[in-house]
Amino acid sequence: MINNNMKTKLSHKASGKGSTFLSSTIYYFLFIISYLLFPTICRAATYTPDNLPIPYLQDKTKYVSNPDGLLSQTAVDSLNLWLGEMEAAHGVQTVLAVVERVEGGETYDFCMALGRKYGIGSKEQNTGLIILLSTGDRAYTILTGRGLEGTLPDAICKRIENRQMLPALREGDWDEAMLATVRAITRYVDGDPSLVGSSDFDDDDDTAALIVFLGMMVLAIGLIALGIWLDERKKSYCPSCHQHKMKKISSYTTKNKRLGIRTHHDTYRCAHCYFTKELHWDEDLHSGGGAAAAGGALGGSFFGGSGSSFSGGHFGGGSFGGGGASGRF
Amino acid sequence: MKTLKSLLVAILATMAFTSCTYNKLVEQEEVVAQKWADVQTQYQRRADLIPNLVNTVKGYAAHESETLEAVVAARTKATQITVNADDLTPEKLAEYQAAQGEVSQALGRLLAITEAYPDLKANEQFSELQAQLEGTENRIAEARRQYNEAVQTYNVSVRRFPNNIWAMIFGFDKKTPFAAEAGAEKAPEVQF
């Protein structure tokens, strides 16, 4: 396309018509600008399983993906609360997404790909659940994980869609469509005593994270101690008799104010063969806190890392066999 | 003595290597068998849905008996063919696929005629049956996909050197994946 435009521009230039040349140049720039802008606009409204934001991964209290802002904040908060209770009490892990458009316009395919990508639901129970509404495609899907097919058979999913979701969708009330759907699903899930809650697992998770964190701390302290010890051992090494019996017998410092350096002159003598050696090392007076700064940075990264693992959710590797129901409105 | 020792080591190493390969092939063959069982379960599930669906449609469209009978006949024929995972030859798989394909076509025709009966379409029981059928078709597609994946993993293992030597000795043959359904590659045409 760009090449074509270039050609028109060149041919106009050759014919020497000033005004046409000017307008074609303007078109050319307009074209480039639209070319630069348009893909971003497209990307904002059409989602693939790979680029759909999943807030749950950053914050495990957020089950709703609402990238186009089609749901109100109040609705999102209620949905997050209910879905959180459902996961804690029954171990049903949900992703609920409301978007403008999905790639290909097929919500079922999108949900299957999403389920395959993230492995939503625990591996033991396989109770993942995906609810997707694509308002631009006017299509929706409730996809149930393998372990949820007994609690929410296809016919029940269809019934929930027909009775709860559809009336609100026909009115264009996306909030009510999702709220009513999740309310109905919660009733079925609450009625199934075989589903085991995940609240116990969560505690284990946090304990495990704490143990890992403490382990890393101990390891870090151990490494620093080892470093100091090795350093001392190196200093006590006698090059004459190859024994670690050097001892510091005297030391003095000189200062170079211009360079900002303090030089240490240490004399070591071997207790075994009385060999003496001198060690000179410089201390930079301006950045004396270097080691402390490095330590701070280390601690910071430790805390940052553990912070995200405490609050971010993770999917358990559940699988989907194609259960659920889809429809259009 | 030294040659004897190195010979012994070589034999032991080969044995360890072989048993490792052998176990891997057995494992992958089991996965294929399990995925094949899944495929058959899903087709059976569809067959189980058909009587209910036919009865519901009959209540509204009794004079479409020809289409209804075609579905029942195709179902009866398809349920008679079951293939054991041990003898998944290309011929048997093709036969199985053809029989199930007939059921799919008969069901497609049945669902097409239901479009002409608004009362039937408004019936909630029918809508839910249709959803179940749709879900089952989705499950069949997923089961077939997973079966094909397992077959591919297994076939690659069997053909890769040096596994192919052990596969030949122990009799691990290549397995047959599902071929794309005839006509499935082109989207159905909608006419108004």
Image: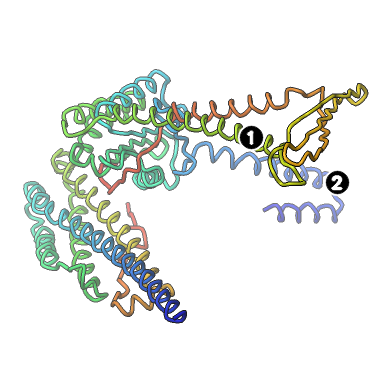
**Residue that mark 1 sits on:** A229
Q: How crowded is mark 2: few (under 14 residues within 10 Å), some or many (20 or more)?
A: few
Question: Does B5 appear above or below A212?
Answer: below
Label 1 sits on a secondary structure element that is: helix
- The answer to which of A208 and A218 lies nearer the viewer is A218
- The answer to which of A305 and B83 lies nearer the viewer is A305
Q: Which residue is drawn at 32% across and 34% down?
A: A93
The amino acid on which the numbered mark 1 sits, given as a three-letter code, is Trp
**Residue that mark 2 sits on:** A18
Residue B49: x and y, percent? Answer: 13, 51
Tell whether A247 sits left or right of B107: right
Chain under callout 2: A
Instruction: Name, please, the residue furthest toward the right.
Output: A258
Q: Residue at x 43, y 42 (%)?
A: A102
Q: Residue at x 30, y 42 (%)?
A: A123
Chain under callout 1: A
Rounded to the nearest whole Å, what is the CA distance between mark 2 and mark 1? 81 Å
Tell whether A108 sits left or right of A215: left
Label 2 sits on a secondary structure element that is: helix
